[in-house]
Image: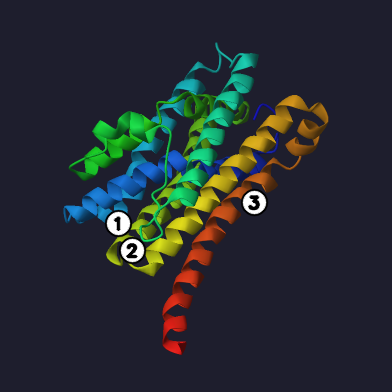
């Protein structure tokens, strides 16, 4: 992310897509899955909104970081090593997430839905039983206190200061949050619907999503490694950052549609049989 677009429109579009991609992070999906299931089990009305609440809490921290970077931009710039170190941290997490979710799908009981597996979620397992809407948002805020989120936000906020200081940094922060809110909100709503019907729909959809998350995580990690070790690939990839983000979002979004199509085919096949 150290070679962000210099055009404001392209930069804004990229940051929005990065927010959507961040919302599809397996740790986000796993945490929202747990929060939604817990809230549904206790009959809480906000269960279907857990994804949006989680994202709003997460986004509040992102905006705070963006504001801080904007205010400090005149006396501080991110050190050169921050981008590379943050990239390797993200790659390691993505590889772990990809492997554990692929293993979860392949080893799952055929009669049980597959739960998405995160890396950060187990560290906050004691905090996940949030008993209120504010508690769900607080869990989202805690998830934002990670190096990859902090470094990513600091880098795009620092870039934004060249377009107008703190206001530009906050504008990009808001776009990032909107993209993340769209992803997490849809995920929470989808999980709530699956919980309401524990049948073949849940079994198929959970496996499709598990494979999609594993595949995307491993693919993004591989692309990240290629960019860090190959200057030629990095130069080629920098010109296609926006396209890469759109592909990642598109693949995960398409998995929802595939899951729905497969689920709809089950009762149709039964009736035909």
Residue sitting nearer the eye, 83 or 35: 35
- Residue 267 position, x and y percent, is 41, 79
Circle number at residue 193:
2
Where residue 48 is drawn, which disc sits there?
1
32 relative position to 231: left or right: left
Looking at the image, which residue is at 71% across and 26% down? 228
SS class, disc 1: helix
* Spatial separation of the CA atoms under disc 2 and disc 3: 26 Å
Left or right relative to 248: residue 184: left
Residue at the (69%, 41%) spot, across then down: 241
Residue of label 3: 247
Q: In the rendered view, would you say 4 is above or below 216?
A: above
Marks 2 and 3, the one that precedes in the sequence: 2
Q: Residues within 10 Å of mark 2 (few under 14, many from 20)?
A: some
Q: Residue at horizontal 56%, vertical 34%?
A: 95
Residue 218: image quadrant is top right
Q: From the viewer's perspective, is the residue at label 2 or at label 3 nearer?
A: 2
Q: For this rendering, which residue is in front, 260 or 18?
A: 260
The reply to whether dot 1 and dot 2 touch (C-beta < 8 Å) is: yes
Left of 193 or right of it: where is 68? right
Residue at point 29%, 46% (across, down)? 35
């Amino acid at each position: 992310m150290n070679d962000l677009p210099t055009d404001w429109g392209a930069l804004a579009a990229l940051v929005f897509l990065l927010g959507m991609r961040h919302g599809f992070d397996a740790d986000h999906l796993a945490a929202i899955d747990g929060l939604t299931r817990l809230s549904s089990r206790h009959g809480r009305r906000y269960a279907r909104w857990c994804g949006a609440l989680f994202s709003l809490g997460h986004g509040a921290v992102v905006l705070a970081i963006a504001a801080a970077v904007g205010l400090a931009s005149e006396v501080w710039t991110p050190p050169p090593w921050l981008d590379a170190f943050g990239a390797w941290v993200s790659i390691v997490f993505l590889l772990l997430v990809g492997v554990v979710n692929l293993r979860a799908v392949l080893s799952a009981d055929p009669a049980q839905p597959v739960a998405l597996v995160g890396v950060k979620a187990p560290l906050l397992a004691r905090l996940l039983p949030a008993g209120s809407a504010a508690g769900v948002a607080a869990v989202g805020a805690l998830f934002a206190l990670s190096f990859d989120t902090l470094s990513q936000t600091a880098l795009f906020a620092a870039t934004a200061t060249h377009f107008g200081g703190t206001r530009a940094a906050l504008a990009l922060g808001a776009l990032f949050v909107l993209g993340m809110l769209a992803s997490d909100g849809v995920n929470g709503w989808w999980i709530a619907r699956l919980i309401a019907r524990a049948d073949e729909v849940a079994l198929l959809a959970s496996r499709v999503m598990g494979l999609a998350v594993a595949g995307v995580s491993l693919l993004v990690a591989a692309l990240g490694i290629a960019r860090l070790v190959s200057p030629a690939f990095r130069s080629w990839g920098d010109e296609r950052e926006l396209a890469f983000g759109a592909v990642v979002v598109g693949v995960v979004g398409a998995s929802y549609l595939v899951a729905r199509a497969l689920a709809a085919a089950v009762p149709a096949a039964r009736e035909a049989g």
